[in-house]
Amino acid sequence: MRVPEHRSAGDDALKLLARFGMVGIAATILYAALVTAFIGTARCHPIQPSLGAYAAATLYSYLAYKSLDVRVGPIASN
């Protein structure tokens, strides 16, 4: 039995959505782990560790989403 060589655009979109979801979940877990670690080691107001963890998770998200390298082709004009 022969497997078709083409994939539908829906399959690619679903895979991309799953990748975006995994990056978001990983960023959330990273934030939670960092804020817990920072609050446990720092003797300061909880806002400062939260901001540091947020900055690190944001940087991670940016780089991870950028690595997905989604490019949109030119828009067809009418």
Image (spheres, rainbow, N blue to C red):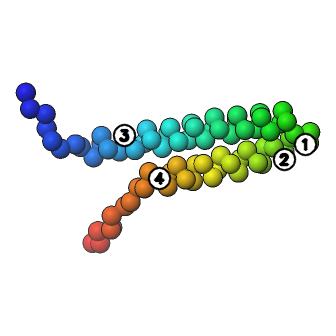
Instruction: Identify the image quadrant of residue 12.
Output: top left
Q: Secondary structure at mark 2?
A: helix
Q: Residue furthest top?
A: 1
Q: Are marks 1 and 4 in contact (CB under 8 Å)?
A: no
**Structural distance between the alpha carbons of marks 3 and 1:** 42 Å
Of the two numbered discs 3 and 1 on the same chain, state the one appearing first in sequence.
Answer: 3
* In this rendering, position of residue 37 left or right of residue 64: right
Tell me the mark number nearer the camera, choosing from 3 and 1: 1
Q: Residue 41's x, y, as percent?
A: 85, 36
Residue at image mark 1: 45
Q: Are marks 2 and 1 in contact (CB under 8 Å)?
A: yes
**Structural distance between the alpha carbons of marks 2 and 1:** 6 Å
User: Label 2 sits on what residue type?
Assistant: Gln
Of the two numbered discs 2 and 3 on the same chain, state the one appearing first in sequence.
Answer: 3
Q: Secondary structure at mark 1?
A: loop
Q: Residue 62's x, y, as percent?
A: 57, 53
Q: Which mark is residue 14?
A: 3
Of the two numbered discs 4 and 3 on the same chain, state the one appearing first in sequence.
Answer: 3
Residue at image mark 2: 48
User: Label 1 sits on what residue type?
Assistant: His
**Structural distance between the alpha carbons of marks 4 and 3:** 17 Å
Residue at image mark 4: 67
Question: Few, some or many C-alpha atoms within 10 Å of disc 1 (few <14, some 14-19, many ≥20)?
Answer: few
Q: Secondary structure at mark 3?
A: helix
Residue shown at 60% from the left, 48% from the top:
60
Question: Few, some or many C-alpha atoms within 10 Å of disc 4 (few <14, some 14-19, many ≥20)?
Answer: few
* In this rendering, position of residue 74 left or right of residue 1: right
